[in-house]
Amino acid sequence: MALTKCAEFISYSRTYQERLSSRRLLHFASTALFWECRTIDSSEVNAGKRPIHQRPRWVISRTGKEQGIVETLDLHNQYERWYMIVQEFSPRQLTYKSDSLSALSGLASIFEEAYTKEDEYIAGLWRRDLPHGLLWTVRFSSETSRALEYWAPSWSWASIEGEVYWPTRTIERHQRDDFAIELLTNNLRVAKENSKGTVLGGHIRMRGQLRLLSCITKPVEWGALLRYRYDLWCNGKVIGNGSFDVDGDDTAEGVWLLQMHVQQPGDCFFPYHPTALMVQGLPGAWMKFVRLGCAVLDDEQLDFFDACEPQDFEFY
């Protein structure tokens, strides 16, 4: 195939897990033969260089030995690696977006077999790191949408058509104990033939602190928090800033703030580090929510959740 067509080929989501799980790859272009392995990318005409694309740094073995995509890592680095895979995967082309979870199910099985055997895969995330996993956000420059057809819960990155990433990957490991959310039960329904594929329905039950917002407005000047460009109001004052997963959701009413991470002074000056989720109650239902976006509190409002008792709720 032509080199341009080869580049198009590797940009498709369906080829991603095959490429990542392969020890060696051959690319047949119109001008030359290109190859990849765990230690080098090369070609007939450009030996020793990277003529097509850079091999993802997170699949290269630290020992330099030929291995699969997995290696001995501590627990947190294992999850970081998964988030990097999803980030690389999300902007790729997919004929049917509803296949996004199915397209990664093979890699999820490899991860589970390698070092998450005691964990549970839940709609593209891992149970033992779920509080961290829920804090994904969309790229600022990415166009996003949420389809009417259901294939994943609103809190899963797979429910969004667009590029996602995890800004909280920079959180120090000791801060992971500061998460303020707890998963109680997983009540999702998945297909019997592929438990890591498309979600058919259901919810997860969680316990956390929620507080209803008065309103949400978009300021004339965004200031420093360019990513979180909406003002969040409660009791007549701005308590923080938020960002919607889909722009069309900015007219939503009945929006609550769900604390995810215990925010520390100065965190609001790192606008790519969300500490809460914006959620909306389902019509006519009590303590049943869907996700709308991410948020961060102002430094003067770090006690915003102090008066809120943890409550059990269902997350759809």
Image (cartoon, rainbow, N blue to C red):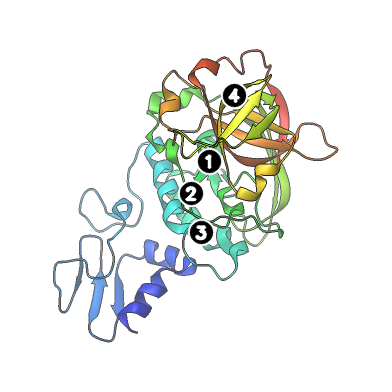
Q: Please tell me the numbered disc located at residue 238.
A: 4
Q: Mark 1 — residue?
A: 119
Residue depth check, mark 4 versus mark 3: number of the one nearer the observer: 4
What residue sits 44% from the left and 52% below the top?
87
- Image position of 247 with respect to 293: above or below: below
The C terminus - image quarter: top right
Callout 4: helix, strand or loop?
Answer: strand
Q: How crowded is mark 1: few (under 14 residues within 10 Å), some or many (20 or more)?
A: few
User: Sequence-wise, which precedes: disc 1 or disc 2?
Assistant: 2
Residue depth check, mark 2 versus mark 4: number of the one nearer the observer: 4
The reply to whether callout 2 and callout 4 are in contact (CB within 8 Å) is no
Residue type at mark 1?
Asp
Residue type at mark 4?
Val
Residue type at mark 3?
Leu
The reply to whether callout 1 and callout 2 are in contact (CB within 8 Å) is yes
| Residue in front for this viewpoint, 132 or 231 | 231
What residue sits 25% from the left and 73% below the top?
35
The reply to whether callout 3 and callout 2 are in contact (CB within 8 Å) is no
How many numbered discs?
Answer: 4
Q: In this view, does 85 lie to the left or right of 153?
A: left
Whole-angstrom CA distance, mark 1 to mark 3, is: 17 Å
